[in-house]
Image: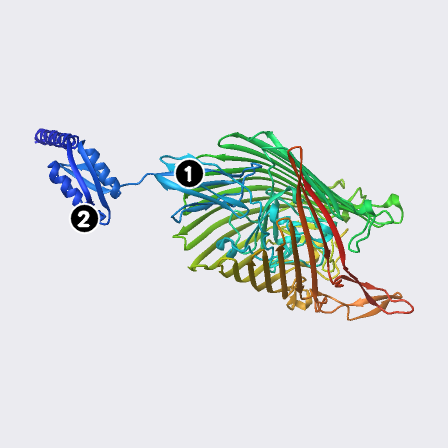
Amino acid sequence: MLIKKIFAGFFLMIIVVAVKGQIQSSLGKPISISFNNESIPQSLIYLQTKANINFAFDPAIIPSDIRFTKTYNNTPLVNILNDLLQKAGLSYSLVANQVVIVKRKLSSFTIDGYITDSESGEPLIGAYISISGSKIATITNQYGFYSLTVPAGVYNLTVSHVEYNAEKRDVDVDGSKSVSIELNYKQNNLPEVIVGATVKPDPVAVNQGIRNLTHEQLNQNTYYGGEVDLIKALQMQNGVKALTEGSSGLFVRGGNLDQNLIMLDEAMVYNPSHLFGLVSIFNPDAIKNVQLYKAFMPASFGGRLSSVLDTRMADGNNQDFHVKGGVSLLSFRAAAEGPIVKNKGSFLLTFRRSLIDLLNKDYRLINPNSTYYDVNAKANYQISKNNKVFYSFYGGRDELFSENSYGNQWGNITSTVRWNHVFSSRLFLNLSAIYSNYENSLDLNSDTLAEKKRWQTGIRDKTLKADFTFYRNPFNEIKFGGLLTRHEFIPGQVENASLGDLNIPKDKSWELAAYISQKYNYKDKINIVYGLRVSNFRNAEERLGLYDKNENPLDINEYSTYFGFEPRASISIRLAKDHFTQLSYNRNYQYLQLIQNNELAFSSLETWMPASKTTKPQNSHHLSFGYSYQPEKYSFRINTFYKELFNQLDLLDHTQIIQNSNVRSFLRYGTSTAYGLELGINKQTGKLILGGGYTYTRVFKSINAINNGERFRANWDIPHEFKSSLDYSLTDRFKFNSFFTWASGRPLTLPVGFYYHDGIQVPIFEERNTYRFPNFSRMDISVQYSFPLTYSKHTWKHSFSGGIYNLYNRRNPLYYRISQATENSTLGLINSSTRILPWIAYSFQF
C-alpha cells in the first residue's frame, strides 16, 4: 500500500512538472498583437484568446480606468504580459495549468544621506525632505541625517529649510542608495519673529511647544549692552519668564529654574550665567542650533520636570578658512574655523572676554570688578561613508572681586566625544562620552587675610550615552537608547578648613536610564508620538562625625535607591486646512535639585543636592493642550497647561546654607501646582513682521512647616505677561527692530514690623510672599546695518548695530534690601533698579 502511494505521488509530480514546463514554453512563444486604447480587462481577454492560454484572475483587482495602447510583432508572450501587468500594477504566478494574475508585491528601497550648507559643509538640522505629489516626508536629525523608504520608482525629491533656497532632485529608486544634497543660503532672508513661533512654522512642532532657533535667527536681535544672547532670546518667548532683569534663569510654564535640562552638545550645564545672569555662557559665534521643549518632552530626555534646552555647537567650515568676531560694550569675541581635511573634517575655535574691568565702567547692574571669559572648541572628521567622529569642548569662568579683596569665582567645563554610525540606510546610532564640571567658590569673612577661607560648591558628571534611530518607513520612526551617569556632588565645603564639621556631606550617585519611543504619522492628518523612559538612581551620602575607637574618621556612606517610570505621549491632529490641535502628557522624575535661600534674588552660589535617604526625588504630571491656525503670512496660537509637582523642596525662612552641615534638616517638602494660558499672534506684511504674545500663569506651593502649612505663591508666580516685537527691513542691509514687555511684579516677603535685640532693629516677618514688586515694563529698540567689502577676491562682511535698552528709562526694581534704622530714620528698604542704556556693537566675518 505504501509503495502504491509513493508511486502515485511521484507520477503526479511528473505530470505537474510537465504541465508547468508546457505553460512556460507557451509563455515564450512569439506572437503579434496590437492594443488600441483598450482597458486592462479587455486587453487580458484579447491576449488570452490570441495566445490560446488560460489566465485566472479576480476581476476586483483589475483596474478598469487604465487604457493600454501598443503594437507587438513576433514578441514573446511573457514580454507582452509583463508590459500589460506592469501598467496595471499586477504580476503573475504559475499555479497548476494556469497563469494566475495577482497584485504585485512592490519592492521598497531606502534613500538616505546628509543635508548640508553648500558653502560651509555644515550639516543642517531640521531640513525638510519630501516626495513631490505625495505625503511622504521627513526631517533631518541633529546631525543632518535623513532616511526615506519608498517603493521602487522615479521620484522628485524636494529639500527645504527656513533659511535656505529649496533644492529639487530627481531620484531613480531601483535600490537603496545614498543621496546627500547641499543647500544654498538665502541672501535676502527676512528676519524671523522672535516672539512665539515663525510666520510659517511646522504646526506639529508649534503645538508640541518646540521652539527652534538657528545661528542666523539668534544674531538678528541684540540685548543689553549690544550682546547677542541665547537665554535672553528664549526669555522673549511665551511661557518663558525671567525672575528679574538681567537674569539667566529660565522659569518655563510654572517650573523652577533648576527644573530645566540645559545641554551644550549633550553635556549638562548647571549654571548658564556670566555676570550673575546679565550674559549667558553661550557664545553666539559657537552656536548652530537651539531647540527648546516646553510642552511635550521626548522620552530621550529626562532628569528634569519643566523643559529641555538642547544647544548644538557649530561644526566649522570644511571648505574654507574663515575668521569672525565682534565687540560690544560688554565683551570682545573672536572665532576661527576651517577644514582639517577638505570635505571630510573641520574645526571651530572661539574666544570671548568681558571688557567691563578694562573699561572700568559701572553699568549699574554689575560690579565693575567683574570679569568673565569662555572658550569653545569643536572638531569633526568623516572616517568613512558610515562613520563620523566629533569632539566638543567648553570652558568658562567668572571672577568678581570687591574693594576689600573678597571674591566669588565660578565656571563650567564640558567635553563631549561623539561617534555617528550608520548601520544601514534605516538604522542610525549616536554614541557619546560626556564630561561636565561646575565649580563655585566664595571667600568667607574673617578678621585677617591669613584667616580667610573659601566656601566651595560644585557637581561633576561623567556620562556614557547611546541613541539609536530606526526609520521603519516614512510614517514610522522608532528611537531607543540609554545612558549611565556618575554624579559627584560637593554641596558645600570650606577649603583648607581645620574644622570639617562646617562641611555639608558629599554625595556620589549613579543614574541609569533607558527609553523607547515611536513617532507615527497617519495620512498627514494625525501625528502620534509616544514613549516610555525608565530610570534608576542610587546615591551614596557621606556620613560625617563618625570615628573609630582611636578617634580616626570613618569612611561610611548611607545608600538609597529610587526608580522612575515615565510615560510620555503626544497627539497632533490636522482638523482642516491650516487648523491644528495637539494634546500631550508627560510624566517626569528629577533626582537632582538646587538648594537656594528664599531671599536671594541674585546668586551664583548654587548648592546642588541629589535625592537621598531623607530627600525624595521630585516628580510631576504635565498635561498640555494647544490649537493653532496658520494660513500664509499669519499665525494664531493658543495653548493651555496644567502641572502637578511633588516632593518640592524649600528651606525654612532665613536658613543659612554656608557652613551649615545640617542644612538638609532645614529642608521641608510639599507640592506645587502650576497652570496657565498662552496666546500668540504673528503677521507678516511685506518687509514688516509683527508679533505679540500674552501669558497667564499661576504657581502655588504647599510646604510643610512653611507659611503655617498654608498654600502660598511661589517666587516665580507672575500672573500676567505681555510681549510684542516689530521687525522691519528697510533694505537688504538696513534693519530695524523693537521689543516691548510688560509683566506683573513677582512676589516677595517684606517685614511687617521690627523689634529691638541688643540695641539692633530686627525685622518681623509673617506670611511668605504676600507682597509683590511693582509691575515690570521695558522697551528696547535697535538698528543694524550690514555691508560686504571685497579685498583681493575675498569678501569681508561687516555689521554695525546700535540701540537703546530700556528706552523710556523705566526704574524696574532688581531687589530690595532692608536697611537698619539710624538716628534720623527707621527701618526701611533700599531699592536697586535698572536705567536707560544706549549701546553700539560691531561684528565681522572674513
| Amino acid marked by disc 2 | Pro
Label 2 Cα neighbours within 10 Å, binned few <14 / some 14-19 / many ≥20: few
Percent position of residue 177, x then y = 41, 34
Tell me the quadrant of the picture where the N terminus can be found.
top left
Q: Is residue 201 left or right of residue 65?
A: right
Left or right: where does residue 761 sit relative to residue 716? right
Tell me, for residue 111, which label it has, or none. 1
Q: Residue furthest right?
A: 823
415 and 324: which one is in front? 324
Q: Residue 356 appears at what percent x and percent y?
A: 79, 47
Please provide percent x and percent y for residue 838.
76, 55
Q: Are marks 1 and 2 in contact (CB under 8 Å)?
A: no
- Position of the C terminus, as image quadrant, is top right
Residue found at x 66% / y 55%:
736
Mark 1 nearby-residue class (10 Å; few <14, some 14–19, many ≥20): some
- In which quarter of the view is residue 49 placed? top left
Residue for point 53% across, 52% down: 297
Residue 810 vertical position relative to residue 308 in the rendered view, above or below: below
Q: Which mark is residue 606?
A: none
In whole angstroms, how far apart are the C-alphas of marks 1 and 2? 35 Å
Q: Determine whether, in the image, residue 659 is placed left or right of residue 151.
A: right
Residues 105 and 819: in front is: 105
Q: Is residue 733 depicted above or below 344 in this figure?
A: below
Q: Which residue is mark 2?
A: 59
Q: Amino acid at mark 1?
A: Ile
Q: Earlier in the sequence, mark 1 or mark 2?
A: 2
Q: Please indicate, yes or no, whether residue 165 appears anywhere in the rendered image.
A: yes
